[in-house]
Structure formats: C-alpha cells, structure tokens
Image (cartoon, rainbow, N blue to C red):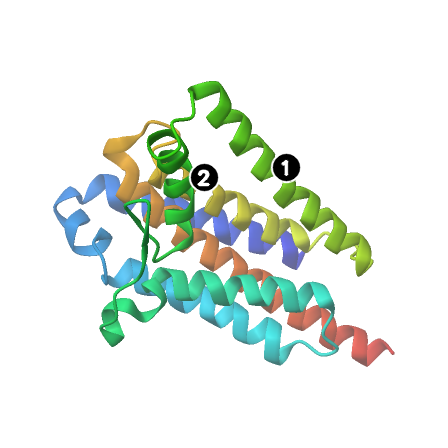
Amino acid sequence: MTRLIRHHIALAVFFLSLVIAWAVFPAWRGFWMNEDQWIEWASFLFFGAAAFVLLLRVTPRTTKDIAVGALCLLAALDEISFGERIFGFVAPSVGGVKIDGAHDLIEFLRIVPKEVFGLGKGAHLALLLVLVGLALWGMVRMARRFSWRWDAEDSLGVVACLAVAVAMMIDAHVLGFKHLAVEMEEILETSAGFGMFLYARYRAGRAALDRVEA
C-alpha cells in the first residue's frame, strides 16, 4: 500500500469518524458545531498548517504550491471570519448579506440577483453558470500559464476542494438540506482541512525526496 493511498484512507476514516460522532452523540452537536467551538478551530488549524507547509516548508516551491497554499490560508482565515470576532471589527454587508467568509459570496449570488435586481429564476441560473464558467476558465488559464502538471498526489487536494464546494452549497441551502446545514458544513470543512494538511505533508516529503535524488 502506497503512502498516498494511506493518506486517502486516513481522510476517509477521519470524515466517517466525525459523521459517526455526530450521529451517536446528538447532545454534543451544539457544543462542537457552533461558532468558535473546537471543530471550527480544528478546521482553522488544519488549513493554517497546510498553508504553512506549502508556503514555507516545500522546497523547491512551485507556483502550484504557492497557489494552493494561498487558498489554504484564505480558508483558514475564513474559518475565523478573518478575525472579526477576535479583533472586534464588523464585516461589511452587501445587499443585506454580511460578507465575512467565502460561503457568504454564494449566499450573495443566491439572494441578491433575485431580490435586488429582480432577475427571474432562469436569468439567475444563467448568471450563476456564467460566473462559475468564468472561474473555471480562469483556473485553466492559470494552470496553462504556469504549466501546472497533474500528479497523483493532487487527488488529495481535489477531494478536499470538492468537500469545501459541497459544504458551501449546503451552507447556502443550494442543495436544500437546511436541517443539516451547520453540522454537515462543519464536518466537510474540517475534513477538507485535514485533507489539505495531508496533501501539504505529502508534497513536502515528495519535494525532499526529489532533492535527494537530484
């Protein structure tokens, strides 16, 4: 069994452990799912550690390491609302939606075009598809510009990104699971942070091995 496969298994076990804990101990849900509780801080620490490794410990560093590390840093800051509650400042509101995290951008795109600009359902969906397409196009352009190469280790990062994407959609009620929004959002985000940390550690080990072989 390769190290990469073990990392994928570790990520799956971590996610399932959180789901089982949520199911078996319902009395604890409020304690560990609310704002500033341990699961949210665990997400912050995992994403922060991944950013630290990718931005400061991987040598030589590629543009892909820098890009993913920057995203992990943003994800870590997003978990603590960019320090709003810690430092006591008030995040701005746009169209009645308070913007203190990435998930609020989805909420903004879900609510504001319909309620502020009066867009119909079809026009609103078309706008969302255009914005998603532009984001994907930008990512592809960046990958081509810097000649990013797909490696097997990137699968850990892809799984983590998918978990974050699903968490954001659940949180914005795009999938309709309102009663699970808080719980599943936090579980998926913490699992994604753990996955990014595993990815960063794998990248650091791979880079060190490449240096030795060189």
Q: Residues within 10 Å of mark 1 (few under 14, many from 20)?
A: few
Task: Give above or below for 86 relative to 40.
Answer: below
* 165 w.r.t. 33: above or below: above
Name the spot of residue 61 as percent of width and height, x first.
72, 74
Q: Is residue 19 visible?
A: yes
29 or 99, which lies in front?
99
Instruction: Name the residue carrying label 1.
Output: 133
For badge 2, the amino acid type reads Val
Could you say which quadrant of the image residue 181 lies in? Answer: top left
**Residue 143 screen position, x and y as percent:** 75, 54
Marks 2 and 1 sit apart, C-alpha to C-alpha, by 17 Å
Which badge, 2 or 1, is on the more N-terminal residue?
Answer: 1
- Circle 1: element type: helix
Q: Amino acid at mark 1?
A: Gly
Report the disc number at residue 147.
none
Residue at image location 57% in from the left, 39% down from the top: 131
**127 sits to left or right of 59:** left
Q: Residue at the location (58% across, 38% down)?
A: 132
Q: Secondary structure at mark 2?
A: helix
Q: Nearer the viewer, residue 5 or 203?
A: 203
In this rendering, the answer to whether 189 lies above or below 67 is above
| Horizontal side, residue 96 vs residue 4: left or right | left
Q: Nearer the viewer, mark 2 or mark 1?
A: 1
Which residue is labeled 2 in the image?
166
Q: Is residue 47 left or right of residue 187?
A: right
**In the rendered view, does 120 fall on the left or right side of 84?**
right
Q: Nearer the viewer, residue 121 or 197?
A: 121
